Amino acid sequence: MKSEVRFLHKFLKSVGFSEYTSTRKIQELIKDVIMNADSRNYTTLDGKEDTVLVEFCKDFAENMGIAVCGEFDENDTFTFYYFYPYLRGTGVSSMEDVSVERHAAKESYAGVCDDIKVGVTLIFYLQNMIPYIKYRNTDKLPVRGTSLTLSALASQGSIMMPIIKSENQKKKIQQSTMTRNQLIEAARRGDEDAIESLTLEDMDTYTTISRRIQKEDVFSLVDTYFMPYGVECDQYSVLGEISECHVTRNKLTEEELCLMTLNCNELSFDVCINVKDLYGEPKIGRRFKGVVWLQGAVNYPDQE
């Protein structure tokens, strides 16, 4: 194997490798993934038959593990490109169209999804790049009828108590959200009445919050949020309601990991965090606040 690891991944601890801080230990981990991979995906790159792009994946806990990417040349010599920790999501997060762009520095890809539920353009690290490259090689892009499954790794986080809402209030919020989404969809098509309604609604919201923030805590006013964080475009600061959670364990390091499903701005996705980095006790109905690295897998209609 050519090439050596010269960097550590910031979110490696999120899947239970917080003690893997030396280059030697990382290299041993990468060799283990390559030699004992649970799945191997191959494709040619840019139509070059003598070069094969390969991705090795090995799970070390429930739906999470390490992926190693590289290439085989015509002499079957493997050249290491990079590795990353992953969490495979469950369920469907969005049915909106997804566009994909290659990162400038390496053979990895970012996905972009403009989902009206969130309020910001979602940019995520693409997990299943091999199927995408296969479609690109055969000129089958864009693919219609795709869906998106999002997941996230958290570097730090805390548990917050929920905002108490009656059943009537929950129904009102749900109805208000549906109406707002319809207005946003109409505004995208150029409907001036919808644009005016949204502007007036935002002004009313701003006035209400400005008045209440004088006497109330911000987290009693804001139920959930999903905001870009830092300078890297696929990292976000999130506050979401926990709809499912349980603790699992990395079978190699025995570190405990908390796996949660969050509802955030009507968007549902799975999050994993090392128990050492989580402040508070997660329970269904409570809220998780933290910084996450967003990943995603595009579900193609003809995938097996």
Image (spheres, grey):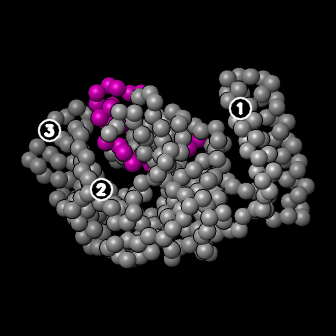
* Residue depicted at 43% across the width and 41% down the height: 298
Magenta stretch bounds: 121-142
Numbered badge on residue 50: 3
Q: Amino acid at mark 3?
A: Asp
Q: Residue 66 at what x, y percent from top left?
A: 34, 60
Q: Identify the residue shown where x is 64% and y is 57%.
A: 240
Q: Which amino acid is tagged 1? A: Gln
Q: Is residue 295 left or right of residue 187?
A: left
Q: Is residue 129 magenta?
A: yes
2 or 3: tag closer to the N-terminus: 3
- Determine which residue is flagged by label 2: 57
Q: Secondary structure at mark 2?
A: strand
233 vs 241, nearest the viewer: 241
Q: Position of residue 286 (x, y in %)?
A: 66, 65
Mark 2 in CB contact with mark 3 (< 8 angstroms): no
215 relative position to 37: left or right? right
Q: Is residue 72 magenta?
A: no
Question: For mark 1, what is the residue?
Answer: 182
283 up-or-down from 106: above or below: below
N-term-proximal mark, 2 vs 1: 2
- Kindly check if marks 1 and 3 are in contact, taking CB atoms under 8 A apart as contact: no
Inter-mark Cα distance, 1 to 3: 51 Å
- Give coordinates of residue 232: x percent, y percent: 52, 53
Disc 2 marks a residue whose amino acid type is Cys
